[in-house]
Image (tube, helix red, strand yellow):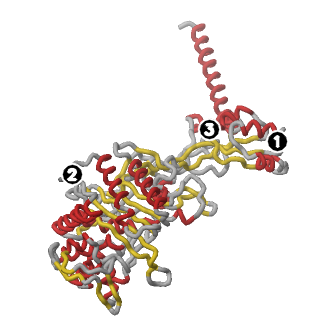
């Protein structure tokens, strides 16, 4: 190699090195020294508020075909604000903004007139596409600040179960429902800022550059929730509840659709309801009556009483007793719903005709202590463990009373009060003899690790009735539908439906019962030979109608036919 060649190589190397150093210095200057300036310039009028809400896990419904449907998610967007000190020709600014987003003129003029104030908020939620149109106008004194908010695409769909994200004082947190119950799991750590290798090289100089820890070794992680709720079923249930509530001018309507074996809640809801992403007229509607309220359920409790007596071997379906229409216990009259006696009747007729005296007979054959223990085994005096906040326990004080009349009335569902969900759970045990653990979350999808984990039930299912007892009481309930419910008019040719209605007087705050206010209830499971669903409906104080068979039979049967068709369940007879 000649001397000239070596010189040329050295000059070329020096030139490349010089260019590299210049580029390196330029990158250092752009990313670290003037990083904030160029970030602001890139955002143009978009600004980031100091209180940007944190990211949050998504909540998904599970469709029957396996697809996930968003129930709650975060949406990125912008906040529209004014700086009245920089605002020029406010009237023109209003017209230009109003052409993109509807604005209240009086409110705009009031805020634009506060010339001593550098910041006045106009709208808190501006979608990105509309923000881009506003930004293109380059209006002096108009600001777009980056923000995000929680959206609920289904609006009222499963609102009582999902809850919402809102402020508790100054803290933005989950309020009500799953948003509250799983708040700590849904909250995501702050997003990691992008860090290039240049910034890494100068991380000691660039103050504040740091990495988010991996989601292992005890570091905090977050998850999306995959629910057991099927959105089409949920929508169908809510439509049914609203129609029933409006038709009978009821104070409240509620419903649950559950797999009685696994405890997975396919749908649950209450009417009136609310939109988690909108304004709420009354705080009272936010309470979830399915887990927070207790009711005297009436005659749907009779199958539990008879199942207990069957399980203990003190009666069989053909066991008879003399029905005089009433009993006198502790000086009080306990009567059938119509006060009429039927003479000698069987236990099957106790269900068919919903006889209070027959339920009392079965409980007396058991004895008060065994009767009490069976009801406790059904979980009636305990929370179900559902993953929702504020779950109440049942009120079973009368079962421990020394007054015979208190225990007797509990046998037909009066004098004891239960949450709707605890009632569904107990009635599910009639299907196969096991008490399930209701749950709303199927699995957790962890954001950082990209791993999924099945959500464990709150408790393992426990056997509370012998399998043969469950088979017997199920057969009795199928006969009740086939022979007695609306005189057999709703019997299904190819499916066995096990069901029972309930009508209960509602207690008054001062004690006793209101003769004009009733709670209607209805439950049923099917196909009865291999139960796939249990459906429970209740109606608080319907107007102009007395019995649950009149108000809830048709809604129940419509939901039953829908579920049989939607899931293509095979006939069982």
Label for residue 128?
A: 3
Return the residue found at the far bottom. 331
Q: Mark 1 or 3 closer to N-term?
A: 1
| Viewer-proximal residue among 525 and 73 | 525
**Left or right, 219 with reference to 484:** right
Q: Are marks 1 and 3 in contact (CB under 8 Å)?
A: no
Viewer-nearest residue: 241 or 35: 241
What is the spatial separation of the Cα atoms under label 1 and label 2, in whole angstroms? 75 Å
Q: In the rendered image, is residue 268 in sight?
A: yes
Question: Disc 2 or disc 3, which is closer to the eye?
Answer: 2
Q: Nearer the viewer, residue 569 or 50?
A: 569
Element type at mark 1: loop
Vertical side of 163 occupied by 39: above or below:
above
Residue linked to disc 2: 494
Residue 81 image point, x, y percent: 73, 45
Q: Residue 343 at x, y = what percent?
A: 21, 81
* Label 2: which secondary element: loop
Looking at the image, is mark 1 or mark 2 earlier in the sequence? 1
Q: How many marks?
A: 3
Question: Which marked residue is nearer to the observer: mark 1 or mark 2?
Answer: 2
**Residue underneath mark 1:** 86
Residue 396, percent across and down? Answer: 36, 79
């Amino acid at each position: 190699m000649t001397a000239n060649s070596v010189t040329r190589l050295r000059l070329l190397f020096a030139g490349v090195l010089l260019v590299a150093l210049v580029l390196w210095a330029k990158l250092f200057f752009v990313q670290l020294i003037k990083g904030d300036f160029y970030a602001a310039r890139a955002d143009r009028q978009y600004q980031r508020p100091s209180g940007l809400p944190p990211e949050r896990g998504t909540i998904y419904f599970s469709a029957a075909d396996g697809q996930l449907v968003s129930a709650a998610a975060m949406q990125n967007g912008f906040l529209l604000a004014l700086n009245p000190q920089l605002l020029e020709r406010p009237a023109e600014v209003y017209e230009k903004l109003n052409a993109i987003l509807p604005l209240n003129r009086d409110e705009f003029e009031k805020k634009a007139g506060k010339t001593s104030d550098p910041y006045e908020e106009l709208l808190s939620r501006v979608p990105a596409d509309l923000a881009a149109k506003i930004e293109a106008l380059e209006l002096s004194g108009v600001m777009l600040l980056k923000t995000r908010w929680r959206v609920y695409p289904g609006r009222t769909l499963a609102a009582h179960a999902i809850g919402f994200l809102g402020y508790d004082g100054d803290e933005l947190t989950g309020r009500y429902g799953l948003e509250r119950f799983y708040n700590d799991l849904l909250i995501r750590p702050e997003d990691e800022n992008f860090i290039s290798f240049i910034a890494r090289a100068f991380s000691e100089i660039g103050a504040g550059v740091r990495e988010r820890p991996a989601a292992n070794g005890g570091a905090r992680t977050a998850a999306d929730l995959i629910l057991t709720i099927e959105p089409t079923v949920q929508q169908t249930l809510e439509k049914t509840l609203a129609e029933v509530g409006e038709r009978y001018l009821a104070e409240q309507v509620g419903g649950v659709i559950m797999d009685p074996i696994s405890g997975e809640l396919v749908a649950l809801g209450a009417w009136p309801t609310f939109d988690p992403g909108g304004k709420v007229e009354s705080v009272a509607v936010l309470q979830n009556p399915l887990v927070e309220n207790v009711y005297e359920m009436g005659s749907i409790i009779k199958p539990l009483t008879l199942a207990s007596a069957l399980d203990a071997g003190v009666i069989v379906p053909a066991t008879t007793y003399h029905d005089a229409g009433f009993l006198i216990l502790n000086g009080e009259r306990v009567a059938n719903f119509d006060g009429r006696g039927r003479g000698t009747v069987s236990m099957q007729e106790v269900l068919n005709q919903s006889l209070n005296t027959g339920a009392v007979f079965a409980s007396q054959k058991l004895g008060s202590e065994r009767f009490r223990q069976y009801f406790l085994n059904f979980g009636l005096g305990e929370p179900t463990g559902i993953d929702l906040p504020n779950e109440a326990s049942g009120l079973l004080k009368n079962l421990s009373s020394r007054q015979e009349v208190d225990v007797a009335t509990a046998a037909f569902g009066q004098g004891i009060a239960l949450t709707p969900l605890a009632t569904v759970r107990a009635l599910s045990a009639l299907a196969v003899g096991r008490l399930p653990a209701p749950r709303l979350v199927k699995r957790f999808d962890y954001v950082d690790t990209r791993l999924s984990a099945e959500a464990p039930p709150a408790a393992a299912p426990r056997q509370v009735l012998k399998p043969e007892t469950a088979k017997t009481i199920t057969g009795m309930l199928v006969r009740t539908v086939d022979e007695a419910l609306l005189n057999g008019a709703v019997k299904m040719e190819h499916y066995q439906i096990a069901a029972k209605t309930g009508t209960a007087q509602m207690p008054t705050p001062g004690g006793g019962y209101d003769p004009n206010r009733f709670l209607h209830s209805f439950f049923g499971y099917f196909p009865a030979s291999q139960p796939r669903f249990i459906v429970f409906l209740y109606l608080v104080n319907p107007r102009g109608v007395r019995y649950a068979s009149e108000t809830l039979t048709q809604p129940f049967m419509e939901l039953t036919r829908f579920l049989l068709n939607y899931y293509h369940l095979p006939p069982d007879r």
